[in-house]
Amino acid sequence: MIIGNGRLDAVEIKGPMTLADTTMPSLALQWVQQPVRGELQTVQRENATITIDADGSSSKLKVTLTIERRDFVGDALADLTYVISGAAAKSAWTSTTASGTASAATLKDVIDLINELDGFKAWALHAPHSMSVNSDNFIDLAETGIQSGTGVESASEVLYRDASDFVDGNSDYVAYLRIGLPEVRDADALKLLSIEGTSTGVTNGVLRLYQDDYSKYGETAPVYVNKALVAAQTEYVGKDRIDASTIQGPVILEVRSDDLTAAEYRVGIMQASIGA
């Protein structure tokens, strides 16, 4: 994959990170039509969809994945449905070979459960893996087809937060931006050149940049930037190519405050190593 304009010293500006119902999706997923071990050859898995109901499971998040099937002559067969409900703790699928249900407490739980299903692949977008899904503070999504393919360009971006209601573990309103190289989920080294932006509502506000690597979940994550939030246009980090710190991705830019109502931030990065 070519990063930026193909030069090792190319500067990329990531963002804008904003606080809105229609920006910064939390989850990426894709589906690949493929034979499934143990399933009759007369069964054709034709399409997969996702439906999100913010308060569909005991007033908590409900994510429904549906696989549409047909036989060899084109007649419809019964759909397979997989339902993930937001909860205080994760519970395993009741079935992965037939329709099933499961529970998830965090975004990572949702990702892990989806990845257990044949043909699906999911990963985190603009949210930390530890983000709670045990609430109704998300945006509904009517049944929507899931992008089919294996490349990042074929992924569906879903699970938007309700910006006026969603709060983090500190009871703060929050916006997130995930950055990685070459994709947002990848862990190549990068140089941090700049972080700048504006906010509305900065009482007790904090701007943080920290590593959020799936493979290191549960470990103490490095924090690269931790500063008090300022309302006016502010350069929180400003470095040239020589002085810039090298950090390990993927990272999350987090802007939070107990009265945050608007935010717009951009991050300048540069590739720091030649990846595979």
Image (cartoon, helix red, strand yellow):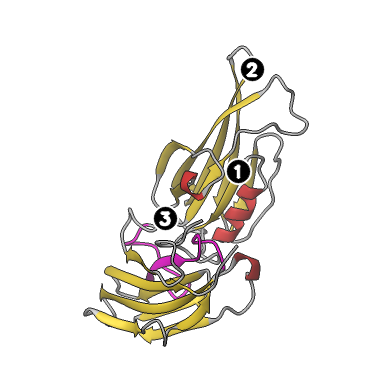
Q: Work out which residue is located at the far top of the displayed protein and give it.
A: 73
Q: Disc 3 or 1, which lies upstream in sequence?
A: 3
Viewer-side residue, 142 vs 188? 188
Total number of numbered discs in the rendering: 3
Q: Disc 1 or 2, which lies upstream in sequence?
A: 2
Provide the residue designation for mark 2.
71
Crowdedness near tag 3: few (<14), some (14–19) or many (≥20) residues, C-alpha within 10 Å = some
> Label 2 vs label 3: CA separation?
35 Å
Q: Which mark is residue 120?
A: 1
Give x and y (percent) for residue 63: 52, 46
Q: Disc 2 or 3, which lies upstream in sequence?
A: 3
The residue located at (67%, 22%) in the rendering is 43
Crowdedness near tag 1: few (<14), some (14–19) or many (≥20) residues, C-alpha within 10 Å = many
What is the secondary structure assignment of the residue under circle 1? Answer: strand
Give x and y (percent) for residue 114: 61, 48
Identity, as a three-letter code, of the amino acid under mark 3: Pro
Magenta stretch encompasses residue 167: yes
Magenta stretch bounds: 162-187
